[in-house]
Amino acid sequence: MTQVEAERLVELAKRRGFFLQSAGAYGGVSGFYTFGPQGAAMKRNVEATWRDRFAIQEGHMEVDAPTVLPEPVFEASGHLDGFDDMLVECPECGESHRADHIVEDTETGIEEAESLAPERIEEVIAEYELVCPTCGTGLAGQAIEQFNLMFETTIGPGSSSPGYLRPETAQGIFIEFPQLAEYARNQLPFGVTQIGRAYRNEISPRKSLLRVREFSQAELELFIDPEVDEPDLSAVGDVSARFYPAKAQDCEGGGVIETTIQKAVDNGIIADPWIAYYLGVAAEWYQRIGLDMDRFRFRQHRPGELAHYSEDCWDAEGDVSDPGKEPDWIELGGFAYRADYDLSKHDAHSEEDFTVFKQYDDPVTVEKPTVDPDMSYLGPEFGGAAGDVADALESLAEDTPDAFEGEDVTVEVGGDEYTVPVEKTGFAVEEMTESGEHITPHVVEPSLGIDRALYTALDHAYREDEVDGEERTYLSLPPEVAPTTVGVFPLMDKDGLGERAHEIADDLREAGFAVTYDDSGAIGRRYRRQDEVGTPYCVTVDYDTLEDGTVTIRDRDSTDQRRVAVEDLAATVEALVAGEETFATL
């Protein structure tokens, strides 16, 4: 395999219409990219494979939520307080930079500086005398500030209804859980998927598609009963991948472990079977879209890296390093066990119930503490706080019934304490028959970045070789994700060859293939153009086509050619794309 320098890949992407920096006519805008004709087509194909594997094959629902949500959503989710990056400002040029990136990009030996506290980052900057990447001014002594990454806006005129562009698609799913649970007939487990745009006001966007301010996410939120629901690991147990556990990262000599999903669970490498299941699903998917699995791994988050909502998390990572350089691992997706954090938060902050009713197999008799406060006592004693005191007594009885064993019980309301004689609370323990209980589901979340997956697929697909004495560049993309499936060329645009080639191109389009038609320049040059954008098959219409009804079909990677009857062409291409036929056996 030929590795490619990032600059050359970005140049190819711009020249051939994969992606380019937005608003170039106005000097460009950092962190925003436009997908050109090839990139938009490839992006649709990548999303289609994700939808097929994570939604359709798994039997999950799909939604499409708004990209702007009101402020209370993000107050409940914790994003207003905990969705920050570390910022350091240069005292000379005034440029702001991500402090953890400055640490990682220099000779400190620290690979995951994001997990360090701001105070430790300040110490590292001073210890290694790190400087501003823009002007070279020393940054020692500069304060590290927390910068919230969300884009703020207002909903409607004025500023009375603040909102935010979503930093992840997940909250659009969580806030609709009560209705989604009804669609699922309140039967756990069930999953909800979404592909959409997300926005993060990055301090220092860089590396083209790898660090941007607007990007596409493909997320699955799987709602489970943690006491009974388990995945069928046999479906992915034999999938092999490379794992980099947290313990291996923290000990000298620790390294990547290559093993199967089942063995990773059996040996305690992956603790949660649901995360293990989706690591297996994802490994198959990343390979399906063309990633080199020798340059791919799953890395477990160390404790300091875990998001505020996550109990355990693994990242899918791809190596996009330049030739001859140390591996450059980038995050492609995260696989988190979010427990009941999100649903509990929205349950507490909203007016909806974010639980499901779990039916017991058989009714059970339970002892349930209850209160029936004497309001004729609470009213005169506590005035306007009486109702809140009654509610607090009810909550206390549910959570801590032992508190009612003395003569008095104390509750806190609005920061003030209220003491009530137990005899005035109406406390009692009653036997009740229950047919079930309300539970808050836990959440397993595979969250994958589409843009980064596309970039890494291009990086891993890049090839250089020599054909007929000429150097050739091509993208060895899987036919399923390549922007174009078939290029159709007339040998020459005369003697009816062009007309017949157009007819064949139209027939292939009707059969559902993405087809490009090209009659410009020498046939070899046309092949090279299609090779460079990853078109897997090219069809040439020549004089034999007019005589015997056959065409030449050419394979991109091997450059081998075969004659195929026009009437069999669509079926042949379909079999090749589906992997039911190989070019060598045509």
Image (spheres, rainbow, N blue to C red):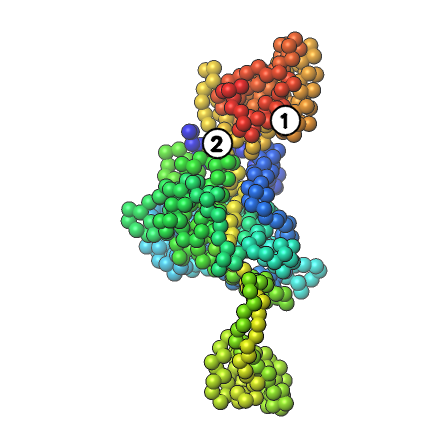
Q: Which residue is mark 2?
A: 461
Say if 354 sits above or below 560 in the image: below
Relative to 464, is 426 on the left or the right?
A: right
Q: Residues within 10 Å of mark 1 (few under 14, many from 20)?
A: many
Residue at the location (68% across, 23% down)?
Answer: 507
Looking at the image, tell me whether mark 1 or mark 2 is earlier in sequence order.
2
Q: CA distance from mark 1 to mark 2?
A: 21 Å
Quarter placement of the N terminus: top left
Residue 186 point in image, percent of width and height = 61, 58
Quarter location, residue 188:
bottom right
Residue 497 point in image, percent of width and height = 67, 13
Say if 247 sits above or below 368 in the image: above
**Which circle marks residue 346 in the picture?**
none
Q: Please name whichever residue, 141 or 367, is drawn nearer the observer in this view of the structure.
A: 367
Q: Secondary structure at mark 2?
A: helix
**Which circle marks residue 515 in the picture?**
1
Residue 179 point in image, percent of width and height = 65, 58
Residue at the location (52% across, 58% down)?
Answer: 225
Q: Secondary structure at mark 1?
A: strand
Say if 42 sits above or below 364 in the image: above
Amino acid at circle 2: Ala
